[in-house]
Image (tube, rainbow, N blue to C red):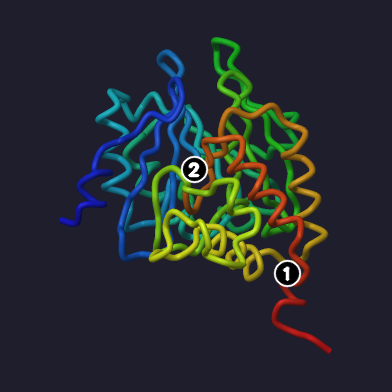
Amino acid sequence: MSNVESLYDNYIEIAEGIYWVGFADEHAGFHCNPYLIVDNDEAVLIDSGGRNDFSTVMLKIMRTGTNPKSIKRLIYQHYDPDLCGNIPHMEAMINSEDLKLISHRENIVFINYYSVKSQMQCIEEIDLFYEFSSGRRLEFIPTPYCHSPGSFMTYDTKSKVLFSSDIFGAYDSNWTFYTHIKEQCSDCETAIGCEFPKTECQIAGVLNFHKRIMPSIKALKHALSRIEALDLSLIAPQHGSILNTEISRDVSIQRLKSLEDVGFTCFYKE
């Protein structure tokens, strides 16, 4: 087992009652991050992961002391297999008639091909929020075409954590749990002054991911404007590193807003 894998072989609490239950592989260059929110005897799991990740994710969930049957909702912020592939295993392990899957109607069309039995809830039909019995509220923020038509983010009003889905994701072999993006990354055309001159630039991994995955800069800027309007403690993306500082969030947003070629225009130039 590598040092990275052993360091992250357990769950990590990133805010009160919020746990990273993902899988770390220093050779992957692409990391997926499921998150568990526990509130008293209720739990919600966001973007539960791919099929091969099921045993790792479920083991970490149980290590938090959470009974799988207490998971009331599975939230899927889009429909890719790295988020949804283990749905049948989750349904079988949770084995509860109370379990529901929450997503956007555009995603549910495809999520139906993963799910075998659970009732689906469309975010629009539940007024763009889910509320625990305690009153803790998760708000769903649509971000169309970032990167799919039904993409959305989830904002926990109690902790002020934003689960940003693919936004702020990265292709990055220099993965760290919390990002190393700092003020000097606002202009990283040169490595002068960089604390990590022999490693791959993390901001470059973020920019490359968005240029290749997002369909257009207009869709991306719309999503970023929604994020800038929020009161945030940290941003927990579904891929890449967690943005746990104000400067890392500000630098990432400004660098992403400055992109010119995104999606179609990145690959095709007249």
Residue 210: horizontal and vertical position, in percent?
64, 63
Give the farthest residue toward the front: 192
Which label belongs to residue 150?
none
User: Which residue is painted at 55% across and 35% down in the image?
Assistant: 245
The answer to whether 260 appears left or right of 162 in the picture is right
Horizontal placement of 46 versus 54: left or right? right
Identity of the residue drawn at 79% across and 86% down = 269
Q: Residues within 10 Å of mark 1 (few under 14, many from 20)?
A: many
Horizontal and vertical percent for residue 103? 62, 43
Question: Which SS class for mark 2?
Answer: loop
How dense is the environment of label 2, judged by Cα within 10 Å: few (below 14), some, or many (20 and up)?
A: many
Residue 174 location (% of width, % of height): 40, 60
Quadrant of the frame with the N terminus: bottom left
Task: Name the residue that disc number 1 marks.
Answer: 262
User: Residue 217 at x, y = what percent?
Assistant: 78, 62
Please report the residue visible at 73 percent of the width from the left and 48 percent of the height from the top.
143
Q: As drawn, which residue projects farthest toward the bottom?
A: 270
User: What element does badge 1 sit on?
Assistant: loop
Q: Which residue is mark 2?
A: 242
Depth check, front residue: 156 or 199: 199
- Say which label, 1 or 2, has the lower sequence index: 2
Query: Could you give the CA–CA distance between mark 1 and mark 2, rounded to whole angstroms?
Result: 23 Å
Question: Which of 191 and 78 lies nearest the eye of the viewer?
Answer: 191
**As drawn, which residue projects farthest toward the top?**
134
Q: Quadrant of the C terminus?
A: bottom right
Q: Residue at x 68, y 59 (%)?
A: 148
Residue 203 lies in what quarter of the image? bottom right
Q: Amino acid at mark 1?
A: Val
* Type of the residue with mark 2: Ile
